[in-house]
Image (tube, coloured by chain):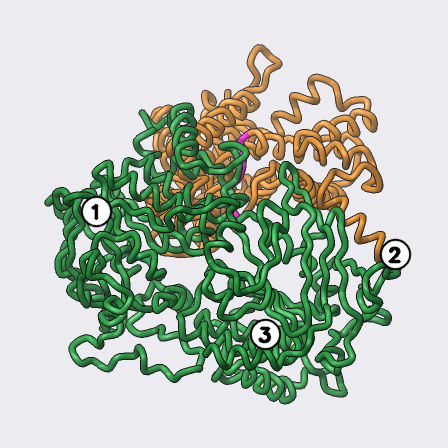
């Protein structure tokens, strides 16, 4: 792979500068989000933007895509290139006379090379006309429309009569889908696609705009390793075509595999621009401004305590009779961290939801301290001391437009109520205490959860369960999309919890994390518990071997998916409550 | 081209700081700064300037009386809207409760206190049914309460046979004044407003409303029994509607099956003018009161100015749109 990589890199064009950001500054009330950021992007380059959450990456790319405007500093873009894939019949959206020149240079270039001009990107359309396309983490696709309709949304090919030329649209969409190696019909409704394919559709859409600059915001966060390889292949092809790519990722190993240069942002400043070959420790140091002594600071207990949670024969069938999970049994002891690993659709999240009483199950029991829990009853599970930090932080963990105080105290509302009245003062005190303990970076307890960075949001969700005196905390993908610094803080918290005799069941698709933090690792495959590994036995190979082993000779969907296909191995026995997207999101465990 | 640049700059200004010019009259600015209360004050000042009779104490009490029924209905609807639902049935439920009180006290010969309790219970029960349809029947709140709107109105017509029933005299005192000047409906409005504020801010029921309206799934995963809560929320809305219906009938001294037609829309407008979001998770009792007062001041003032009832409807619509528009602007600028 590395050889191919190098070949491509050598073949890439020498690299005219396409885009330059100079001293860009942006403040929001109370926060300086960007403070003199510089960035330069060449044609045929993958430029990685690295930084902790809250470092300013999002603000910067929002500026390039027309959502924010800088308070100070300049954005410069190269003239319409002579060699670049811009212009052309579909390059410009339908617009009124003169529209095409709207974002054209408004200031004569001074010092920079004559090919760069200052631009003001005021709207998404401005960015589009300049050839800047952005693939956000949240996709901009209309679920009920087809792939082709989404690709050409707002600017469909027209016939002479100004009617939509469906034939041309379909043909062009098919061509673009071939380029991103996506094997679906242009007529497929987007709602039927998994998250990996959605991303490919977004890329196809960007290609249809003949983008010269492609910004990708954490595109690999939700992909399996196979899908990541496909994505990398496409990105390398684009690079060879002379497209400049700004690539945001939290996975340091991807930088060496794909990147050319790295710009590191910290606290709104661009602190360094280094080659992609820079070693990971150095990158982390640049990113957090200090050395992170240990990435996984797990302190294993000398010997685990009494069993807290015991699950026996837990089984749940999907609507068509196929098991979502079957005969799952395990126990978690006080003071332990038990990891739950497995592939996409293996049923990990579904088991966690059933244990916590969110979903019902068809057979089996869940016991806490020897007491059998009523199935499908969240409140009973909470009374017994369980807590769940769900995988979808924003959708299920937080009330985004409520204050941090309300979020932190939500799970203890019952206990703070006397005679129907809530002890708001007591809640404030408790929330302040836990926020300080978790070092939540906030302007005050009245701040809305929406405005926190991902890491701080996750601390609030965990804090909610600390305030509810949870004894067994189920963490579902606790550090997904969270920066290195906040990750370590969360791991430390896990240590604190278990040192105090509580227990943690951790579902994670980040294998190094599972291995680094768990005392024991349970591996699920196709809805069954495929095996259990002690902390010493658990290696990446051992876990993967269990995760891909077909159960009872049943045809294994995993590993048989066509290579380079962009196919998420989802949809096998997926629970009814789990959308295709959710199960596909689980897919990065193979890494 | 340069025009393009300028609009961009103006939009930016609106987006980040309150504009200090260009957005027109001081009325607009008052609202931008102070929200619904600023709007109410500005409206009062405008009416006082245009009509000499407006600021008269008796007239102001009249405004209070005119606002009272809408406000009490709207307090109940606030609960529902905060929890991201909607209740279209409150006008009908108000009329139904009032007719049941009148029927029970006259035709059925129940003691008046029992008749009133029955009316209140019926209001709550109607809400409970709507809530059950929403929570357990999984009907959209719009449909469930639209059905209740029709059923409630129909039952009121059935009970009365289509003609008004005289309201018991002792209850009709609720429509009178204390000491010859202080209207009881205003007192009821204030009392129900305080209850609504207490419920929203200090009770489990209220905090659960905000959590459910903000993110139902997160609320459920945090141990809030969402289905049961919805029953309570719609039942409370029905209860408030019953109180409003009794106050209205007391003012009219008869229970009329066709009373309060369309009041649900005034109630929703009052809640929204008061700053609540129809997508749930936000809302205040004080805002709702202000919203109801804005509607009442507008109608009263336009009456004093002899504006035709037809044009009054147009004006009311414009004020609703303007109020919510300005509130949206204000929030964006506060960010």
- Considering depth in this image, is A383 or B250 the residue closer to the camera? A383
Residue A506 pos. (x, y %): 29, 53
Dot 2 falls on a residue whose secondary structure is helix
Residue A301 appears in the figure: yes
Nearest the viewer among A208 and A149 is: A208
- Residue A194: give x, y in percent of width and height: 43, 72
Give me the chain that's green.
Answer: A
Nearer the viewer's eye, disc 1 or disc 3? Answer: 1
Image point 49% across, 28% down: which residue?
A: B197
Look at the picture and state if A418 lies above or below A489: above
Chain letter behind tag 1: A
Sequence-first disc among 1 and 3: 3
**Image quadrant of residue A21?**
bottom right
What range of the chain is rendered magenta?
B279-285
For mark 2, what is the residue? B3
Q: Is residue B296 left or right of residue B130?
A: right
Label 2 CA crowd tier, 10 Å (few <14, some 14–19, many 20+): few
| CB contact under 8 Å: marks 1 and 3 | no
Dot 1 corresponds to which residue?
A336
**Alpha-carbon span between mark 1 and mark 3:** 48 Å
User: Of the numbered discs in the image, which one, if any, rests on residue A150?
Assistant: 3
Most common SS among magenta residues: loop
């Amino acid at each position: 792979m590395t050889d191919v990589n190098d070949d491509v890199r050598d073949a890439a064009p020498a690299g005219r500068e396409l885009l330059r950001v100079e001293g860009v500054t942006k403040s929001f009330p109370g926060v300086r989000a960007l403070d003199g950021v510089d960035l330069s992007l060449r044609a045929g380059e993958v430029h990685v933007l690295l930084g902790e959450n809250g470092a300013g990456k999002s603000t910067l790319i929002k500026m390039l895509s027309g959502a924010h405007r800088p308070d100070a500093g300049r954005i410069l873009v190269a003239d319409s290139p002579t060699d670049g894939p811009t212009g052309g019949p579909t390059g410009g959206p339908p617009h009124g006379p003169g529209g095409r020149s709207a974002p054209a240079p408004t200031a004569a270039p001074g010092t920079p090379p004559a090919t760069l001009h200052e631009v003001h990107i005021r709207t998404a359309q401005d960015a589009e006309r300049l050839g800047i396309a952005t693939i956000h983490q949240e996709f901009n696709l209309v679920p009920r429309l087809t792939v082709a309709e989404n690709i050409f949304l707002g600017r469909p090919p027209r016939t002479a009569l100004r009617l939509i030329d469906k034939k041309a649209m379909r043909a062009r969409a098919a061509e673009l889908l071939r380029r991103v190696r996506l094997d679906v019909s242009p007529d497929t409704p987007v709602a039927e696609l998994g998250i990996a394919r959605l991303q490919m559709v977004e890329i196809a859409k960007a290609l249809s705009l003949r983008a010269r600059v492609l910004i990708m915001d954490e595109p690999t966060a939700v992909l399996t390793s196979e899908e990541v390889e496909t994505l990398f292949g496409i990105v390398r092809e684009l690079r060879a075509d002379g497209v400049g790519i700004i690539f945001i990722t939290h996975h340091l190993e991807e930088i060496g595999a794909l990147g050319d240069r790295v710009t590191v942002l910290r606290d709104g400043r661009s602190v360094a621009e280094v080659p992609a070959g820079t070693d990971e420790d150095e990158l982390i140091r640049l990113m957090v401004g200090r050395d992170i002594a240990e990435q996984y600071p797990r302190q294993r207990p000398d010997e685990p305590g009494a069993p807290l949670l015991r699950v026996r024969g837990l089984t749940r069938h999907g609507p068509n009779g196929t098991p979502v999970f079957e005969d799952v049994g395990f126990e978690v002891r006080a003071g332990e961290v038990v990891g739950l690993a497995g592939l996409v659709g293996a049923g990990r999240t579904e088991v966690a939801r059933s244990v916590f009483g969110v979903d019902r199950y068809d057979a089996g029991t869940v016991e806490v301290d020897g007491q059998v829990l009523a199935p499908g009853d969240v409140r009973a599970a909470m009374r017994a001391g369980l807590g769940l930090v769900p995988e979808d932080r924003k959708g299920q963990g937080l009330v985004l437009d409520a204050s941090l105080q309300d979020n932190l105290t939500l799970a203890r509302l019952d206990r703070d109520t006397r005679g129907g009245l809530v002890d708001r003062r007591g809640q404030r005190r408790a929330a302040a205490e836990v926020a300080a303990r978790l070092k939540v970076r906030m302007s005050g307890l009245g701040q809305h959860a929406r405005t926190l960075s991902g890491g701080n949001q996750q601390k609030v969700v965990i804090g909610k369960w600390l305030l509810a005196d949870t004894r067994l905390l189920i963490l579902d993908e606790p550090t997904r999309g969270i920066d290195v610094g906040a990750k370590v803080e969360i791991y430390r918290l896990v240590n604190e919890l278990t040192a105090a005799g509580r227990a943690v069941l951790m579902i994670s698709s980040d294998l190094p994390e599972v291995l680094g933090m768990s005392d024991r690792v349970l591996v699920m495959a196709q809805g069954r518990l495929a095996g259990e590994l002690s902390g010493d036995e658990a290696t990446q190979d051992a876990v993967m071997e269990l995760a891909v082993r077909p159960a009872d000779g049943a045809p294994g969907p995993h590993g048989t998916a066509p290579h380079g296909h962009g196919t998420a191995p989802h949809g096998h026995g997926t629970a009814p409550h789990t959308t295709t997207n959710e199960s596909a999101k689980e897919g990065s465990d193979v890494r | 081209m340069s025009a393009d640049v300028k609009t961009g700059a103006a939009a930016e200004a609106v987006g980040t700081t309150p504009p200090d010019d260009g957005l027109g009259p001081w009325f607009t600015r008052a609202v931008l700064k102070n929200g619904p209360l600023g709007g109410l004050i500005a409206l009062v000042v405008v009416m006082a300037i245009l009509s000499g009779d407006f600021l008269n104490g008796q007239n102001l009490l009249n405004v209070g009386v005119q606002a009272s029924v809408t406000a009490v209905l709207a307090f109940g609807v606030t609960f529902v809207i905060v929890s991201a639902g909607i209740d279209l049935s409150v006008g009908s439920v108000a009329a139904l409760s009032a007719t049941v009180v009148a029927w029970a006290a006259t035709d059925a010969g129940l003691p008046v206190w029992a008749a009133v309790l029955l009316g209140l219970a019926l209001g709550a029960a109607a809400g409970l049914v709507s809530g059950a349809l929403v929570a357990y029947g999984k009907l959209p709140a719009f449909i469930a309460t639209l059905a209740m709107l029709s059923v409630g109105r129909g039952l009121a017509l059935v009970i009365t046979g289509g003609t008004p029933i005289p309201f018991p005299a002792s209850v009709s005192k609720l429509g009178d004044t204390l000491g010859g000047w202080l209207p009881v409906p205003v007192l009821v409005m204030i009392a129900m407003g305080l209850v609504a504020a207490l419920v929203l801010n200090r009770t489990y029921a209220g905090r659960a409303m905000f959590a459910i309206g903000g993110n139902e799934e997160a609320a459920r995963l945090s141990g809030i029994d969402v289905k049961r809560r919805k029953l309570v929320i719609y039942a409370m809305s029905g209860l408030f509607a019953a109180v409003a219906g009794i106050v209205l009938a007391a003012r009219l001294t008869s229970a009329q099956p066709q009373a309060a037609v369309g009041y649900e829309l005034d109630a929703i407008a009052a809640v929204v003018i008061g700053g609540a979001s129809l997508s749930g998770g936000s809302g205040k009792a004080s805002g709702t009161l202000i919203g109801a007062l804005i509607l009442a001041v507008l109608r009263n003032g336009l009456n004093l100015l002899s504006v035709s009832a037809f044009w009054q409807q147009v004006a009311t619509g414009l004020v609703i749109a303007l109020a919510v528009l300005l509130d949206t602007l204000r929030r964006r600028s506060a960010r």
